[in-house]
Image (tube, rainbow, N blue to C red):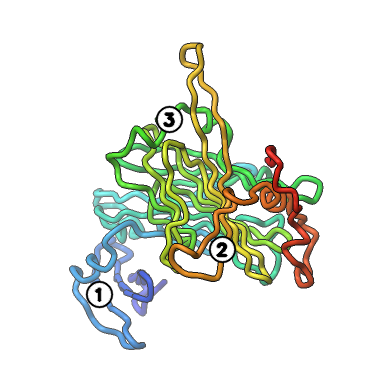
Amino acid sequence: MSGMNNALDVYVQEYRRGIGLIVSVIDVDRTTNEFGHIRHFEIVDDQLILINRARKLDFVSGPISLVIDLKSTQLNPLVIKTTNGTNIQYRLTKHCNAKMRDSISRIRGRNDVFLISPILNIDWLYQTPGSPQSLISSHSVKVDVDVVLQHFTLWIKHNGYVGNYTLSLPPVVNGMFKAQHILDPSYRNVRMTPTGGARSTSPLEIDVSRFDNSSPEVIVVANLRRGCWLYRQYCIVPFPYPEQVVRVTNSQVQTVIYESSDVLVTHVEVFDHVVHGWEYVVVNTMKVYDTDIKDEFHTVTVREVFKRMDGQGPNAYCDLSKLCRCPYVKMLYNISIWEQSCLNVDVHDFVDSDCKAVECS
């Protein structure tokens, strides 16, 4: 925004972490692109407290997420938007050492790490008024959006490697929501070492009580309203190295729901009923088997299904895979998008009593 001096640009940057809030105010001379005053304030109990740069850096201490709202025309000045036909690309400005760089590039420090996340209002075909905002949370440094096909390509950087991954929202077929892996199938045919060969690495934790994403190895799609359910998925990014043990947790009730053993976890799905509060967690796993043909293998996929109970700690979830998994799989993967009342419904109306079924995909 413009300051009192017509030759002065004033930039206000807001940094949030939990309930903490810091605001930086930067004055830039529009004619020379030189910095004037740089001030940092911490807001505590509605009071502005002047702090130094060291305190601000200590508060940030990691990547800075820049929000994109696909329904809004407003955009952070550090994000560049370009349009080509039905494709929209968002990328970050670069820090430039040239003397004549513009003032926008000057406000980005050479050590700042920015991410484009979350991306809001991604579900423009089905999002209903009053529902939570649909979103994608990831460690993306560039994003392509195909507004016709509703495809999203994310460029994710991790340990010096940058991979681009295309994902799409699970489809609706004849009025039925068919939850499935969001990642393009071309990424799923890569032979990876099962978790048993990577015990030395620390576990990858997926906390189903959170939407924000602390790991570059996970893409989160959340708040897809389908009929009486809210759906979200935690997709594990297939970086080109063996995957570690995956631990699925819920920090709100302080419990470990699942921990992988000699299988690959591809993605975790959560189904929340919008009225009755039923919550189901589905851990999708893959077992890799060698064949007699060189460089060929086959896989077996299994869904582990857990139901949220009323308790805390180790009793917070019931492992339905040990009891009666298939009827719940049929219920969760055949959700009618036309059911909107959601009131006079009992879970037994959905679930078949036949627990002997072997095939329940």
| Residue type indicated by callout 3 | Met
Against 51, is 78 above or below?
above
Q: Looking at the image, is mark 2 or mark 3 nearer the viewer?
A: 2
Quadrant position of residue 49: bottom left
The Cα–Cα distance between marks 2 and 3, rounded to whole angstroms, is 31 Å
- Judging by the rendered image, the residue that carries numbered circle 3 is 192
Secondary element type, mark 3? loop
Q: Do the residues labelled 2 and 1 touch (CB within 8 Å)?
A: no
Mark 2: amino acid: Arg
* Residue at (70, 50) in percent of width and height: 327
- Calculate the distance from the C-alpha at mark 3 to the C-alpha at mark 1: 49 Å
Q: Nearer the viewer, mark 3 or mark 1?
A: 3
Which of the two discs, 2 and 3, labels the residue nearer the N terminus? 3
Q: Pointer 2 and pointer 3: residues touching (CB < 8 Å)?
A: no
Q: Earlier in the sequence, mark 2 or mark 1?
A: 1
> How far is disc 2 from disc 1 in space, using C-alphas?
47 Å
Q: Which image quarter is the N terminus in?
A: bottom left
Amino acid type indicated by mark 1: Arg
Marks 3 and 1 in Cβ contact (< 8 Å):
no
Tag 2 residue: 308
| Residue 185 location (% of width, % of height) | 58, 33
Q: How crowded is mark 1: few (under 14 residues within 10 Å), some or many (20 or more)?
A: some
Q: Mark 1 points at which residue?
A: 39
